[in-house]
Amino acid sequence: MNRVEFIKRAGERPYLLDGAMGTMLHTKGAPIDQSFDAINRRNPAIVADIHRAYIEAGADIIETNSFGANRFKLAEYGLHHEVVDINQAAVTIARRVIDSLFKPALLAGSVGPLGVRLAPLGRITTAEAEAAFAEQIGALTAGGVDLLILETMSDLKEMATAVAAARSISPDIPIIAQATFTRDDRTLLGQAPDVVASRLARLDVDVIGVNCSGGPAQVLRLLAVMREAAPDMPLAAAPNAGWPEQTAGGRVMYPATPDYFGQYARAFAEAGAVVIGGCCGTTDAHIAAMRQQLDTPGPGGISVPRVKVVSRADRVTAVSPQPTQLAQYLADKRFIATVEMSPPKGVAAQQLLEGAKTLKAAGANFLNVADSPLARMRMSAWAAAYLVQKKVGVEAVLHFPTRGRNLLRIQGDLLAAHAMNIRNLFVVMGDPTRIGDYPEAMDSYDIVPSGLIQLIKQQFNQGVAKSGQSIDQPTSFVVGCALNLTPVDPQREMRLLRKKIRNGADFALTQPVFDPPAAKAFVAQYEAEYGEPIPPLLAGIKPLYNGRNAEFLHHEIPGMSIPKPLRRRMQDAANPQQEGVHIAQEILQELQPIIQGVYMIPAFGRYDLVADVLDTLPTLAI
């Protein structure tokens, strides 16, 4: 089949592509740390079984098991001399399966990224990269593939090099070029989908699109932007089965079900996709569900997002990135359970990560990472938050103090946090250095918390720095402010809160609450005086540790007032830690009508006591 015939057939009805190969191989016992491509020679039968399952599920196109079969990736396993043999084995296995079935299918040669960076980002020259692609593509075309899929590319220069290699070998073979995107709708090198579409459309390819990335919702959004930017190009869509999650047992799971995938099949076609399939986490069941929807669509369906690509100066800006999970919880009024964690005092983060796993299992859906609490020297809060998100799979809320930072550093730190996908912030003044490890350290600041909230929400999130100069893309921070629900001066606290709200605060984290009636009265007074609802509240809950701890907090910590009956209960308790848990549970229950979540603050790093409090959340009528 030549290029003209391929596109003509695609215009009549979309091709259904197969799903994941790596996921299926892993479920059949292939170790994750071995070359999946080498299985073509070591155990071809299981590769054939996967191809057969996809064709029987209704796939019109299956891909060779050759995604990583280039000299650079195979070199990691000492197999760089077997590029031709492994790729031709991949073609032979798939072709035999197609020939043995009565359901004809096209065979696509799968070509993934090289796994190395091209100059100037890396040390591989364009000539070396093109030679590597040509070696693999030459083997696939010699074996007899019908088309090529260049997939999961994040470097447009690498994609152009792969296309050049393919065209030098086979000028008339159909080529599908697919890019992959991160959670913020950008490639790993920062290109927006409209820019990617425009660049891919200028290459000598037949179809452009998206694979891997996130789930169907994100890929549909990206596809809508790409269609707007390159309206004359046929599109391809092959999303993952959602963002992967790691279970307590270490398994990687994908949440999107086959039925959910099926609902998006028609939407992809309406968005301009002529090739539709799945990537990581998808199975033959997902492809069967998409086949059914493409052939006999049910009622309803998913709407294609309406987008508009807007030129700004010399660059192009596309749709906003996917909101954080915290933003979605706030919008949906879902109950939020977050726990404050302190970064380690050294370089070892294992204790932090184990504590985070315990809290996740107990019901915490977010984790707050404090920045130098009590002005004590600790690991960077950004690094700790990044590790928690990456290793534990729980979204972090980064504490962002203004104290000790000038405007230059503040803005650089914000860009760094966003680049690490840390987009939930809790803006505070920060503890004075005089109480910490380095009392002589600089303690000045250029901006107060309310001003920083304004900078983030009204400038950075609009793509503008404090100076008024444009940054490369708008950020998408969700920002929380601090609030004391039982202050000494309620009027002053209310004025500060209103200013923070006007500047864009999305939610408020409160200081520990020990007097629920007083907290309720504060909320009622604010709403009566200002005629507006208070922002979503995450009530600070701090389980008391013992009687001495209660007395210390009451008498020595500014802004903390613990009623005498509670202090007496702690003094008289036979088991003080358990009594502290009971008190915290009672406070949380009483605050339930005015809050959207809980912000747990452990005493002395006792995450087990916090977990005991969180265990009661399912019993609350929230």
Image: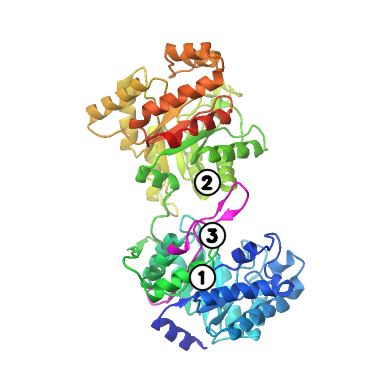
Q: Quadrant of residue 487?
A: top left
Q: Position of residue 135 (x, y in %)?
A: 68, 78
Q: Amino acid at mark 1?
A: Gln
Work out whether residue 314 or residue 506 is closer to the camera in this orientation and state it.
506
Report the residue marked by disc 3.
189
Is 594 drawn above or below residue 80 in the view shown? above
Q: Quadrant of residue 564?
A: top left
Report the residue marked by disc 2.
416
Q: Secondary structure at mark 2?
A: helix
Give the alpha-carbon distance from disc 2 to disc 3, as whole Å: 15 Å
1 or 3: tag closer to the N-terminus: 1
Give the alpha-carbon distance from disc 1 to disc 3, as whole Å: 15 Å
* Marks 1 & 3, CB-CB < 8 Å contact: no
Report the span colored magenta: 231-259
* Marks 2 & 3, CB-CB < 8 Å contact: no
Q: Position of residue 66 (x, y in %)?
A: 64, 73
Residue shown at 37%/40% (left/top)?
A: 506
- Residue 306 visible to the viewer: yes
Is 530 drawn above or below residue 218 in the view shown? above
Q: Left of 298 or right of it: where is 170?
A: right
Mark in the foreground, 2 or 1: 1
Q: Amino acid at mark 3?
A: Leu
Report the residue marked by disc 1.
178
Q: Amino acid at mark 2?
A: Ala
